[in-house]
Amino acid sequence: MQIEFNTHDTGYIVAIQGSVDALTSPQLTETLNREIQNGHHFLIVDLSQVEFMSSAGLRAILGALKGSRQNGGDLRLAAAQPAVEKVLQISGFTSILKTYPSVEEALESLKH
Amino acid sequence: MIEHCQIARAAEFESLSDFRDFIKTTCAGQAGIDDQTCYDLQLAVDEACTNIITHGYAGMNPGTIILSMEIFSDQVRLTITDFGQPFEPSETPAPDLQAIMEDQEDSGFGLFFIYQTMDDIQYQTSEAGNQLVFIKKLLPGDESQT
């Protein structure tokens, strides 16, 4: 798994590449927590290059969602591939956070 | 039976990607197994093996996990064998995300995903090890998919 960052006017994009499982999720948790502590409270997690995500990855995202909202921000997901999108839906994630078909639409949503 | 393959790896998180790759490779080109079905199989096995590594072999030297995959015309049968502490899975309700976010409960995601994605789940334990069997039915009419 690789994680890249991109600062934008309206939000901070965290782009994940590869698989998020029990092996790699601690790295994701640590990275997201660090970015929130560094003041990036509005996060967009770009899932377009995530080929697999297990419950371990969802827990990492859930923790970061909590951290961002505790700091007055939010975490939004973008561009999930269909199979990952299904995981988000059956777990109920789509009812507690916002998901968007593309990073551009997620960024646009933060303007409102 | 169309195909029968098997892989054995150490019970450690580093092996999870090997199990997923094994399933993907075995599914490739098989009639009736589309990308979503393959992902469901990968997800259920990943969650089950994570539980075995975390709980089954807790306090023990990491043992072995054997994954066997049998493909029939109407279903896929996955058998996960381990030699750790027995743990019989049971169906769990949908996770309460709000409670998890408030740190009020453990997630329970893994078992929930297994029961959401597999059509039948069987478990037995003996001196020969613990065997967890997943059945995933293949939809008729998907034969054209590869």
Image (cartoon, rainbow, N blue to C red):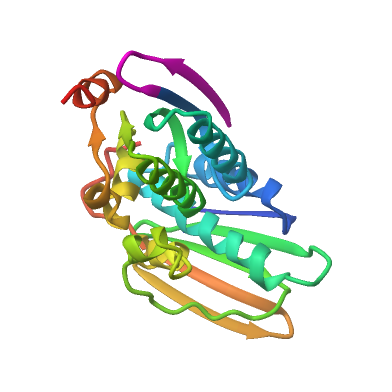
In screen coordinates, is B113 left or right of B13? left
Seen at 38% across and 30% down, the residue is A43
Q: Quadrant of the C terminus of chain A?
A: top left
Q: The magenta stretch spans which residues?
A: A1-12
Question: Residue B44 location in percent, x, y?
Answer: 46, 58
**Residue B29 visible at all:** yes
**Occupied quadrant, residue B117:** bottom left
Nearer to me, A20 or B86: A20
Q: Quadrant of the N terminus of chain A?
A: top right
Question: Residue A38 location in percent, x, y?
Answer: 53, 29
Seen at 54% across and 81% down, the residue is B88
In the image, is residue A53 above or below residue A56?
above
Residue B35 part of the magenta segment: no
Seen at 45% across and 16% down, the residue is A6
Question: Residue A100 location in percent, x, y?
Answer: 23, 31
Residue A6 part of the magenta segment: yes
Farthest right residue? Answer: B61
In screen coordinates, is B5 left or right of A85? right
In the image, is residue A29 above or below residue B100?
above
